[in-house]
Image (tube, rainbow, N blue to C red):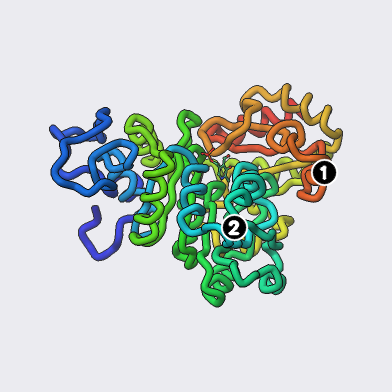
Amino acid sequence: MPDDDRSPSLDTRAVHEGALSPRPFGAVSTPVFQTANFEYHGEEYHDVGYLRLSNSPNHAVLHRRIASLEGSEDALVTGSGMAAISSALLTFLGAGDHLLVQDVVYGGTANMLEHDLPRWGINHTKIDPQDPASWEGAMTPSTRLVYVETLTNPLVQMADLEAVVEFARANGLISMIDNTFASPVLCRPAELGFDLVMESCTKYMNGHNDLVAGSVAGSAEQVRRIKLTLDHLGGSIDPHACVLLERGLKTIGLRVRRQSANALELARFLEGRPEIEEVHYPGLASHAQHDRASRLLDGGFGGMMAFVHGGGGEEADAFASRLELPTVAASLGGVESLIIRPAAAIHSGLPPEARAEMGINEGLMRFSTGVEAAEDLIADFAQAL
Ligand code: PLP
């Protein structure tokens, strides 16, 4: 750690913050505490040492490290991104409550809002994230919360995040944000004033496509309340996955900055190709929220992009099958480049009109940039086109 007044940078904290001290048996990396339960010392129920209650030493290290990376007072690690999102929403919303939600959000979240929460009396209204003047009209006397994503899937749009915070404060709403596509390397919404920041740690936080996990960060009081809900719903993470996630987190700065640099080079290359009709990447001057992204993102514009193959769905699939480096697969954020055609895969459950409304046409491809050499990715795209 630096010995002057500077606080350690994100990269340093990603390696060291919250590590067990003293190191058990001098271990340099955190050992896996593979035990379901711990000796009882008179704790009350939620603090009894038991894995479902997310209180093993492996959990504690991640809670401190993730809170530090997000710039929040506390954090909770969960068994998946959806466990973090559902536990947080169900902590602060009950029967009769209403929330405002950005018009395009991750499919799992959208399905839960559409199909599960209404059965428990929790309803929502979609808002246009680019039009703050319209939000007031969507409020009801029961509105408690506003929910957005830092960068959307698959078109990497960026909401007016500063206006969301201001609106939430002015109206006494809890502000929640899913920061998965950006990761705390590029954006720390808590610093912008968001109350709760969720990550699907399956993606950039872990970064190796080898586990499913999630996190939520916020004030100590809010995180404690969410933990009580998680304790009852059971979406905890096991210690082996904790250790893998801790290992992945150590390189998050290196990975995300490399992925961002690769993505920018590739996006520029694609913009110059006649076969490609549109490129959606916040690092390009042509992106509708490029100025906002330049102001609110740190150190790059992320590894996610979308582009439209002019030949339509069939040509786009043929192009993807000719790529040698990226794998055709869902999920994102890992060191391996992945490509998927949303209309055929992750958004295939939606009717074509709903997809069109979201800007997802047949030839649209989503690309998750890995850490391979940019020149190799570009050469591969060139041969496949
Ligand atoms: N949020 C976003 C933006 C996602 O892309 C995903 C998964 O793809 C999730 C949340 C859900 O995360 P998990 O699959 O870890 O539950």
Q: SS class of the residue under badge 1?
A: strand
- Place residue 145 in its image quadrant: bottom right
The residue that label 2 is drawn on is 148
Q: Residue at x 23, y 63 (%)?
A: 4
- Is 187 or 256 nearer to us in this picture? 187
Q: Residue at x 75, y 31 (%)?
A: 344
Q: Position of residue 164 (x, y in %)?
A: 59, 67
Quarter of the rendered image showing ligand 1: top right
- Which label is found at residue 277? 1
101 to the left or right of 39 = right
Give the Cα distance between marks 2 and 1: 28 Å
257 to the left or right of 125 = left
Q: Residue at x 29, y 38 (%)?
A: 58
Mark 2 is on which residue type? Val
Marks 2 and 1: which is nearer the front?
2
Q: Position of residue 154 (x, y in %)?
A: 68, 44
Few, some or many C-alpha atoms within 10 Å of disc 1 (few <14, some 14-19, many ≥20)? some
